[in-house]
Amino acid sequence: MRLRKLLWTTRNSSQLLQRLSALILLAAVGAPAQTPKTATFPTQMPGHDAILLGTDWYPEQWPESRWEEDLRLMEAAHIKVVRIAEFAWSRMEPSEGHFDFDWLERAINLAAKHGIVSVLGTPTAAPPAWLTQKYPDTLRVEENGHRAVHGLRAHGSVSSPRYREFCRKIAEQMAIRFGHNPNVVGWQIDNEYGYANMSYDDHTRQLFQGWLKNRYKTLDSLNAHWTTTYWSQTYDNWDEIPIPIGEHNPGLLLEWKRFVTDTWNDYQKNQIEVIRQHAEARQFIIGNFMGFFDGFDHYVISQPLTFAAWDDYVGSGHVDPDYNGLAHDLTRGFKRQNFWVIETQPGAVNWADVNNFLNRGEVRAMAWQAIGHGADYIGYWQWRSALNGQEEYHGTLLGPDGTPVPLYDEVSQVGREFTKVQGYFRDTQPVSEVALLHSYDSRWAIDFQKHTNKYDQIALLKSYYHALRRLVPSLDVVSPDAPLERYRLVVAPDLNLIPEDLAHHLLDYVQSGGHLVLGPRSGMKDQFNALLPQRQPGYLVDPLGGRVEQYYALEKDFPVSGVWGNGEAKIWAEQLKARTPETQTLMSYGKSNGWLDDQAAVLTRSYGKGRITYIGAILDDQLMTAAARWMLQDSGVSPILSELPEGVEVSRRSGDGRDVLILINFAPEPRQIKLPRSMQFLLQDKQGTTLDLPPYGVEVVTASK
Ligand code: GAL
């Protein structure tokens, strides 16, 4: 009771903040969080450290006489894994049907002598010249009708049957050769899924038409769901339907995205199946995703993979802990389990506007942040730059002379630390009571018709994340159709598509005691990207006991006030109306455009054993903070955490009866955190009640024995 009172009263003094930090930690390392029972973590391999450091190594670019020295330097940096071969097709199949894997086997064996295991990439993002020149239909056709040129990458056509055949063959030969190699621990399919590029050729168009036929069965159904009477789009034959280019019918646009997803999924399954036929089951199969990239639906593409992995690049500037943390949580949500950071940036990239170097300490802070959010592996792209090729300027761990660059020491420190504390992370994962819902269908639907170019869905997601994540030590980001029972609070910042079956799923959650919070633009459309013939939030109007009367894209901020205080509605505001006496208005607009004046901005209603809340506007940061407190308190989220010292992130991993906290100071000044009692600082190897973190400082804390 005292704890609650203290936490829910407004406070500012630094003394209070210090007490709060102590409370936060007390709560966070109290009784271990309820961990869902998982037999094993596929991200943690038996016989290997629970958290691992690695790099991307390209032995094919160097004389064999050099390999030993590379591997010696890797071993000295505590590197335990290399990802190899994902662009080495011309070395592995130098001419059609002639395979040469001897060199690769020697590289794998030599790495093993240095305690390093290998992840093999299938090289299908870089088909060799003999292939694309002899069989031009393996090259994709771009939107403008031109065939891709050889010499870049991702130039193969994902839908070309001939290209698929070549991909299957090389994957098969690799699996026959290495599927039982004890030093090969897993596989990566392709590289970054060709950025979801499609081939705009007749064959692909026919595939799309067949795919639509299979889905809609009749043209009457398709015409009805897409309202093709509009602008005379009515289709009388399946072969009249185009591949959408530019602004098109929203129904067609959404189905194209789903077709792209299914096409890339089939493309990877073609390789996964053949690898599975020849490889031992212990070898995992992954792909490398790209954070918020939305070229396809990652929940679908993740399904056939053993676990999710992603490439974490900052590009210009410096790490934004919220954005990066959210991207980790998004990736963890693809399979709802721990993941790998298969690539990350060793200092700088070569493709951003300004390829500045990360500050000293920032690379290490990022590595630990990933671990805190559920990563069990961090791999640096790349070990050493090829002496020629498009990425000569990219960050590396060795210079062109083959000796370490300054960052090598920082990465070695990460490796040393991982090795030292890895045992504490065995069988642990972030366990959350709060989930954010994220849906590709809804993201695409809004982006096709933004209505205001200021509407940035990732920024909105991040604003909810920022406010909530400061109060809880972990937060899940999951697909709306994920099981929700384990969450006390589920927040959908802008779930545009809520077809009837999804509405039932969400209502089941509310009825059995959950708190569902919907943000603006929610419940507007069905699965065909058509407007629902109800007002928002569609099938949830009755449970909410209220609805959206009208939405407004804002030219400027409008005042809004109520139980969360006074502030501004930004970018988007919806005029809400309660329709039952039990529906409460939590916030209302002030004087604005006349239409919104004194109208409801936030409604809430108890429903079943739970609650449903609708927030009709994008709120400023201060209101979001108050809203987050209210949501957590109302949902009974425990432990209830309060503000951390600005810039400090706390993450918690739980499992096996143990909680491990990762504390990172992303602020430019030192921060001090008072602990509720003496605790163990695993990195510094000491115990203490006060933790001092310099800028980019990291500590791994656990309760003292
Ligand atoms: C990744 C890609 C790597 C490398 C890296 C450079 O997107 O998978 O192969 O190009 O970018 O930052």
Image (spheres, rainbow, N blue to C red):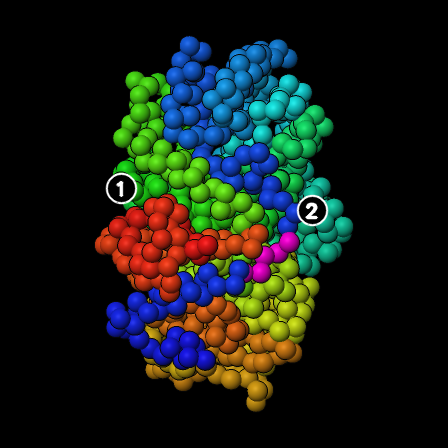
Q: Position of residue 385 (x, y in %)?
A: 36, 23
The magenta segment: 33-37
- The residue closer to the viewer here, 207 or 655, is 655
Indicate yes or no: mark 2 CB to ligand 1 under 8 Å: no
Disc 1, SS: loop
> Quick check: 616 above or below 315?
below
Residue drawn at 40 percent across, 85 percent down: 598
Residue 8's quadrant in the figure?
bottom left
Numbered disc total: 2
Name the spot of residue 651 as percent of width and height, x first. Answer: 43, 55
Q: Is residue 477 above or below residue 43?
A: below
Q: Which residue is mark 2?
A: 212
Q: Amino acid at mark 1?
A: Asn
Task: State the residue position of label 1.
Answer: 359
Q: Position of residue 202 (x, y in %)?
A: 63, 33
State the separation of the CA atoms marked 1 and 2: 50 Å
| Residue for point 61% across, 34% down | 284
Q: Is residue 659 visible?
A: yes
Disc 2, SS: helix
Q: Is residue 295 above or below residue 407?
A: below
Q: Residue at x 69, y 59 (%)?
A: 224
In-image side of 273 versus 515 (left or right): right
